Each structure stands twice: as structure tokens, then as C-alpha cells.
Amino acid sequence: EPEVTQTPSHQVTQMGQEVILRCVPISNHLYFYWYRQILGQKVEFLVSFYNNEISEKSEIFDDQFSVERPDGSNFTLKIRSTKLEDSAMYFCASSRSGVVAEKLFFGSGTQLSVL
Amino acid sequence: SQQGEEDPQALSIQEGENATMNCSYKTSINNLQWYRQNSGRGLVHLILIRSNEREKHSGRLRVTLDTSKKSSSLLITASRAADTASYFCATVLHGSSNTGKLIFGQGTTLQVKP
């Protein structure tokens, strides 16, 4: 079965540094998402992306965050100046369409540790 | 209180037994989905039930939805050690235009002992 691929699996960075988390969604999928899970907490929606635009973003997704689809296969999440509280597992997901009852395919996640 | 509360938080059973996990929510939904997460891995979609459906089956999984009580349950029958994982319910709110905004519950950690 096709998979969503995320790299790196672990990322350690210093507070204030920029990080870019990378994702390769499933090839025929058109909708892309980022979620995060802080240790011991719920999985939280960050942003959805379609047709090279943000469709929806949560309150968490402030000006420090940005997303990009730089080519036909990659989807990235950039955190401009990381904070300690950005430490979390970040999941990329994709779906074939924007139909409401559509399942999401998730990657294995990138564990971000901000020191 | 929040959308998507699950109980129990943790469940430990013997292989072969059935496991039941419950999810309650507060706001009207379009659909409710269940996901599994193995330790250190991503979320895997298990089953989706629409707000106008009451029950769905997929293999050893049975999901029910009671919109009057705003609750859902996931039943795993004849559990196996490989079913050991965390299970999350996730809702898509009624009126949502974007399929990707799932609101997750806290999850139930299931341990199936061989």
C-alpha cells in the first residue's frame, strides 16, 4: 500500500533555530496536512493545504510556521524560530480529495526536540 | 470539556478476549473515524462512520455511533497481541468544508497479553 514518507524521523535543534520538516505525500493525493502531538497530549490539527494554498489553519499555526510544496512531490513544514514548546511529534498526512468523508493517510512522524 | 473524550484511558486484556473502547464528543459531527497508532509510528485509519449510520463492521472491528448520546464505541473481537496499540477517535464537525481537520480524542492504550 502507498505510504506517506517523512524525514527526518528525529530532529534535534536549538531554541531559536529554523527547522524544516519534510514529507512526501502519496502520489495521487491532492490534499496535504500537518498535525502534531505533544508528548502525553492529543493529536492536534495544524494546517491543511490544497492547490498550493492553505485551506485552513489552527490557532497554533502562527507566523512562525509556514508550509510549502516546492515541487511535485514534497510538502514541507518550516518553523522559523523554534521554541521549547514546539517539541512534539509532527505528522504529515494526505488524502485523495476534499470530500468530507475521506480518510487520511499519515506518515510515521518526525520527533522534534527543541533544546 | 472537549470534543473527543475516550475511555478507558488504558485497557489490558488477554489474547482472544474482546476489547471495547468508547468515545464521547460534544458538537454535532459529520463523521467519526477511528485510528490506531503503534508505538513510535504514525496513525493508521481503521474505520469511518457517518452521522447517519449506526453501526459498521470491518473484519474484527465493529463501530457503533449513537448521535443522541454523542458517543461511539469500537469493539475489537478475538483480540491478538498484534492489536496492542493506542486507539483514537477523531471527529469531523458538522458543516466542515475541509476533510482534513480531524479533532482527536486522548486515546485508549490497549495491551493484549499473549
Image (tube, coloured by chain):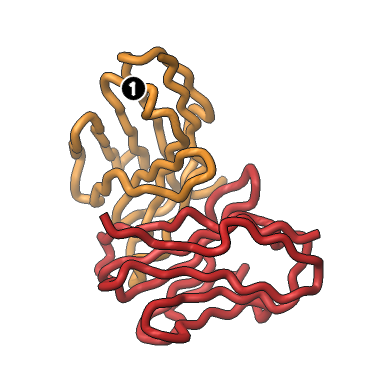
User: Toward which corner of the image does residue A64 lie, by quadrant?
Assistant: bottom right
Q: Residue at x 19, y 50 (%)?
A: B52
- Residue B20 in sight: yes
Identify which amino acid the numbered label 1 is placed on: Arg
Q: Which chain is orange?
A: B
Which chain identifier belongs to the red chain?
Answer: A
* Residue at image coords 29%, 53%: B31
Residue B44 sits above or below residue A18 on the image: above
Q: Is residue A45 visible?
A: no
- The residue at which mark 1 appears reads as B80
Q: Residue at x 47, y 36 (%)?
A: B86
Q: Secondary structure at mark 1?
A: loop
Q: Position of residue A103 (x, y in %)?
A: 30, 57
Q: Picture coordinates of residue A76 (x, y %)?
A: 52, 75
**Residue A41: x and y, percent?**
61, 46
Badge 1 density bin: few <14, some 14–19, many ≥20, Cα 10 Å: some
Numbered circles on residues, count: 1
Q: Which one is in front, A35 or B8?
A: A35
The N terminus of chain B, quarter of image? top right
Q: Work out whether residue A89 or residue A6 is closer to the camera in this orientation and state it.
A: A6
Q: Chain of mark 1?
A: B
Q: Position of residue B57 (x, y in %)?
A: 18, 36
> Furthest residue to the front?
A8
A115, B100: nearer the viewer = A115
Quadrant location of the C terminus of chain B in the rendered image: top left
